């Protein structure tokens, strides 16, 4: 019962709902968390997760394993997340393609301050949410899923070099946002 | 490998997205260069703080909602396949019934037409003996046939057999009377 994702997709194509449940149980939580971290909204993340897995089911009939299943899966996640963002900010000027790292408003306060874990967590989440969408998704996929730059490049539809640059700039921004931290605070 | 190159590649170094040779070179440089080491520590600290942002569990009814939606999708896919098939079947049945009705009506009409009058049907024509036709055609090539036709046309009156017999009897009687006289 330890089928690969591609084997499960083949079974789903034949109408096997048990295989679908297995695939869902394997990927539902990480997909949900990706959307949740990207959108910072639980309800929106649930809607996206539901839509992702309905699309997976619908696509099973024509699915051709050309890349890793997760690369394909997270390309769907990325598209739906970007659509959701576009809807949310319709009328605003900032576009998905904009990669300008925002100016630091409060750079780390006192660099040596002792922060509680909760404060630190809030600060890092706020910093991630301030990142341009492409950078934000790149670090979520890299940090929380361990995807390679190559896989992320396929998901985001850009070059590996672009991913390298995005992740690098995102890390620099986070470092600036958090300031120099005392080791015992995390 | 200057400090700028090292710092530009610190992130890829942390993510192990460089060749083994470059990784060892950067490791060596960072150990010996205070500026690059500070930058590396700053970045990796921030990166590690992200670990505080733990995953959360989706609500249990999300799974149910997804499975329910997929069940509905499966039913609608089934309908999408079955509806056209049913439509084709229905159309075929309608045509079959209509054609059957049309034939029945035609047969009835034909029966009505043939009741009083003799109608030569194609079927009858097909049954005409071919030899008979050939014989008739050969007659037309025969000269005697036309002479006979001429003779027949010139006859105004053709006596009946009874009349001929009566004439013969009368002739015989009168000759007998003559011989007696
Ligand atoms: Zn250096």
Image (spheres, rainbow, N blue to C red):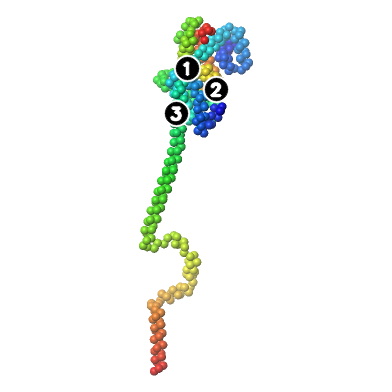
Q: Mark 3 lies on which chain?
A: B
- Is disc 1 surrounded by few (<14), some (14 to 19) or many (20+) residues within 10 Å? many
Answer with mark 2 or mark 1, whichever residue precedes in sequence.
1
Q: Position of residue B101 (x, y in %)?
A: 39, 51
SS at badge 3: helix
Q: Which of A107 and A97 is in front in this view?
A: A107
Q: Does the residue labelled 2 lie within 8 Å of ligand 1?
A: no
Mark 2 touches mark 1? (CB < 8 Å): no
Q: Where is residue A40 in the image (x, y as percent from the top left)?
A: 45, 17
Mark 3 touches mark 2? (CB < 8 Å): no
- Mark 2 → mark 1, Cα distance in angstroms: 20 Å
**Pointer 1 residue:** A132
Mark closer to the observer (2, 1) = 2
- Mark 3 → mark 1, Cα distance in angstroms: 35 Å
Q: Mark 1 lies on which chain?
A: A
Mark closer to the observer (3, 1) = 3
Residue beneath the point at 40% across and 88% down: B173
Q: Where is residue B9 in the image (x, y as percent from the top left)?
A: 57, 14
**Pointer 2 residue:** A151
Using the image, determine if residue A18 lies above or below residue B90: above
Residue beneath the point at 38% across and 77% down: B156
Q: Is mark 3 within 8 Å of ligand 1?
A: no
Determine the image quadrant of residue B83. top left
- Is disc 3 surrounded by few (<14), some (14 to 19) or many (20+) residues within 10 Å? few
Marks 3, 2 in one chain: no
């Amino acid at each position: 019962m330890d089928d690969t994702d591609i084997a499960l997709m083949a079974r789903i194509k034949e109408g096997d709902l048990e295989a679908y449940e297995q695939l869902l149980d394997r990927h539902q939580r990480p997909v949900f968390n990706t959307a949740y971290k990207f959108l910072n909204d639980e309800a929106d993340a649930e809607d996206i997760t539901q839509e992702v897995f309905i699309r997976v089911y619908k696509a099973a009939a024509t699915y051709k394993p050309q890349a890793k299943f997760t690369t394909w899966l997270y390309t769907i996640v990325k598209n739906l997340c970007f659509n959701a963002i576009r809807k949310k900010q319709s009328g605003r000027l900032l576009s998905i393609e904009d990669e300008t790292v925002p100016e630091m408003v409060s750079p780390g306060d006192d660099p040596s301050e002792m922060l509680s874990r909760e404060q630190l967590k809030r600060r890092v989440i706020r910093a991630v949410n301030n990142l341009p969408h492409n950078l934000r998704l790149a670090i979520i996929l890299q940090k929380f899923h361990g995807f390679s730059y190559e896989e992320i490049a396929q998901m985001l539809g850009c070059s590996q070099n672009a991913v390298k640059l995005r992740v690098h700039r995102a890390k620099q921004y986070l470092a600036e946002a958090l300031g120099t931290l005392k080791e015992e605070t995390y | 490998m200057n400090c700028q190159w090292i710092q530009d590649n610190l992130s890829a170094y942390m993510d192990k997205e460089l060749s083994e040779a470059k990784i060892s070179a950067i490791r060596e440089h960072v150990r010996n260069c205070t500026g690059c080491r500070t930058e590396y520590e700053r970045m990796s600290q921030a990166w590690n703080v992200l670990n505080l942002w733990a995953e959360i569990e989706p609500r249990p009814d999300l799974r149910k909602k997804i499975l329910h939606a997929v069940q509905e999708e499966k039913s609608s896919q089934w309908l999408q396949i079955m509806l056209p098939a049913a439509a084709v079947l229905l159309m075929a049945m309608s045509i079959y019934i209509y054609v059957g009705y049309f034939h029945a009506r035609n047969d009835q009409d034909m029966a009505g037409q043939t009741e009083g009058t003799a109608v030569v049907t194609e079927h009858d024509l097909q049954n005409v003996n071919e030899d008979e036709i050939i014989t008739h055609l050969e007659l037309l090539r025969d000269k005697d046939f036309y002479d006979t036709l001429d003779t027949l046309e010139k006859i105004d009156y053709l006596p009946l057999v009874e009349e001929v017999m009566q004439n013969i009897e009368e002739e015989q009687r009168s000759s007998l009377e003559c011989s007696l006289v």
